Amino acid sequence: MIDHLLLGEKAIEAKLMALPKYSHFHVGSALLTEDGTIVQGCNVESSSYGLTICAERNAIFKAISDGHRKFSAISIASDFDGYTSPCGACRQVILEQCGDVDVVMINNKKELKILKASELLPFAFTDDALPTLE
Ligand code: THU
C-alpha cells in the first residue's frame, strides 16, 4: 500500500528532472494508479512560453500513454516552501482524466495538504454537458 507521504516524496524526486529554462521554478508530480504504479512528471518549458507543460499534466499524459486508466492520487511538489496547488488547467485535466482523486501537496517540511480533485474544481465542466453522437 503506497501512502500519501511516499507519493509526496516521489513528487519531490520528480522535481529533479524539471526543465524550467525560463521561470527557473521546478515542479514535480507523482501519479498513483489503482494497480499501485507510480508515474512521475515534471514541468518542461518552451521558448514559446505557452507550450510549457506542467508537471501534473506531464505525469497524467505519460500514464495514459502507457495504458493506465484508473488512478487513486496525485502529488505535487515545487521550489515554493509552502504547498503548491495545481493550476487551473491541471485541475481540469486531473478531474477529467483521473476522477475525484486525492490531490496531495507536499511542502518543504514534508508536511501534506490533501484535497479531493472536486474540492479544487467545484462545479466543473464535464462531458455530461456534451451532446451524445447517435
Ligand atoms: N507549473 C506546474 O508545473 N504546475 C502547476 O500546477 C503550476 C505551474 C509550472 C509551469 C511553469 O513551468 C512553472 O511552473 C511556472 O509557472
Image (cartoon, rainbow, N blue to C red):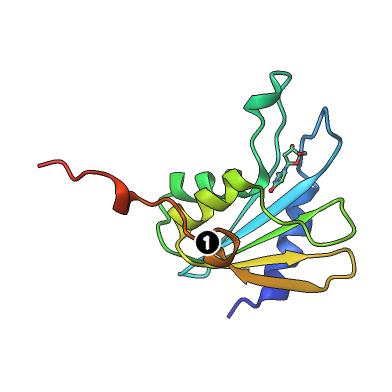
In front here: 102 or 33? 102
Secondary structure under tag 1 reads: loop
Say whether residue 27 is left or right of residue 130.
right
Left or right of 97: which side holds 133? left
* Depicted 105 relative to depicted 97: above or below: below
Question: What is the count of numbered marks?
Answer: 1
Q: Quadrant of residue 43?
A: top right
What residue would you read off at disc 1? 122
Q: Provide residue 59's location: percent of width, then percent of height.
A: 59, 49
Q: Which residue extends farthest left?
A: 134
Q: Within 8 Å: ligand 1 and the Cβ of disc 1?
A: no
**Residue drawn at the location 60% of the way across and 61% of the way down:** 120
Residue 95 percent location from the top left of the image: 49, 57
The C terminus - image quarter:
top left
Q: Quadrant of ligand 1?
A: top right
What residue is at 67 percent from the left and 31 percent from the top? Answer: 52
Residue drawn at x 73%, y 71% is: 113
Q: Residues within 10 Å of mark 1 (few under 14, many from 20)?
A: few
Query: x and y percent of residue 82 in the render?
Result: 86, 61
Q: Residue at x 72, y 30 (%)?
A: 45
Looking at the image, the residue that sits furthest to the front is 123
Residue closest to the eye, 90 or 27: 90
Which of the 4 quarters of the picture holds residue 106?
bottom right
Rendered position, 114 above or below 82 = below
